[in-house]
Image (cartoon, rainbow, N blue to C red):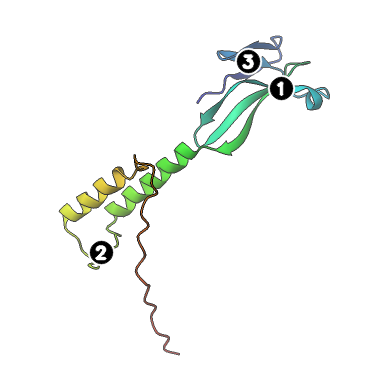
Amino acid sequence: MDNIVEYRTDLPPSNEYPRRIVSPLTPSPCCQANMTQVGQSAIDATWRFYYKRCSVCGYTVRCFYAPSLTAMFEAGRQVRLALAEMNLGTSGRKRRTRAEIAAERAAAERWLVRKDGKEQPVRPLEPVRLAQSTA
């Protein structure tokens, strides 16, 4: 998302939210006590934010307050797709057929929250075998 705040000294501060906000370059001493939220929260890349503007001098900043869950779920989906492509599945064989890789990729693409509201079943991981020490 583009930043709608323009930091300028040649124009007076103005609030034309959501089109644009003209703000001074630096904060004033009044900003600490007079910052108020402008508009609704939005998402930029992987973070949620809102604009805070000083009601006295017009200085404006974007206040990032939480990661975006939508972006985090999409990143997890991309990791599952990458693992399916890299042939790192949970099957016993090292080499899989193209059909098996395509099936895992399709499963990763439709890995969504269940419609009936129940939790996704958790598959137990196979135990890891460690190499024995020769020392």
In the rendering, at what x and y percent does residue 10 appear?
70, 11
Q: Which residue is mark 1?
A: 36
Find out whether the residues at labels 1 and 2 contact each other: C-beta distance under 8 Å.
no
Placement of 26 over or under 96, stated as above or below: above
Q: Position of residue 118 (x, y in %)?
A: 38, 46
Quadrant placement of the C terminus:
bottom left
Question: At 16% from the left edge and 53% from the top edge, which residue is drawn?
Answer: 99
Q: Which mark is residue 91?
A: 2
Instruction: Work out how far the residue at label 1 is from the one at label 3, CA to CA, in angstroms.
Output: 14 Å
From what the image shows, is residue 94 above or below residue 64? below
Left/right placement of residue 90 relative to residue 70 reads left
Circle 3 sits in a helix, a strand or a loop, which is it?
A: strand
* Front of the two marks 2 and 3: 2
Locate residue 103, reporting x and y percent. 21, 50
In the image, what residue type sits under mark 3? Ile
Q: Earlier in the sequence, mark 2 or mark 3?
A: 3
* Number of numbered markers: 3
Q: For mark 3, what is the residue?
A: 21
Q: Secondary structure at mark 2?
A: loop
Q: Residue furthest bottom?
A: 135
Residue at 29% x, 43% y is 110
Q: Residue at x 35, y 43 (%)?
A: 114
How would you rate the neighbour count of disc 3 (Cα within 10 Å): few for under 14, some for 14-19, many for 20 or more?
Answer: many
Residue 20, relative to residue 29: is it above or below?
above
Q: Disc 1 versus disc 2: distance between alpha carbons? A: 55 Å
Give the amino acid type for the residue marked by disc 1 in the picture.
Answer: Thr
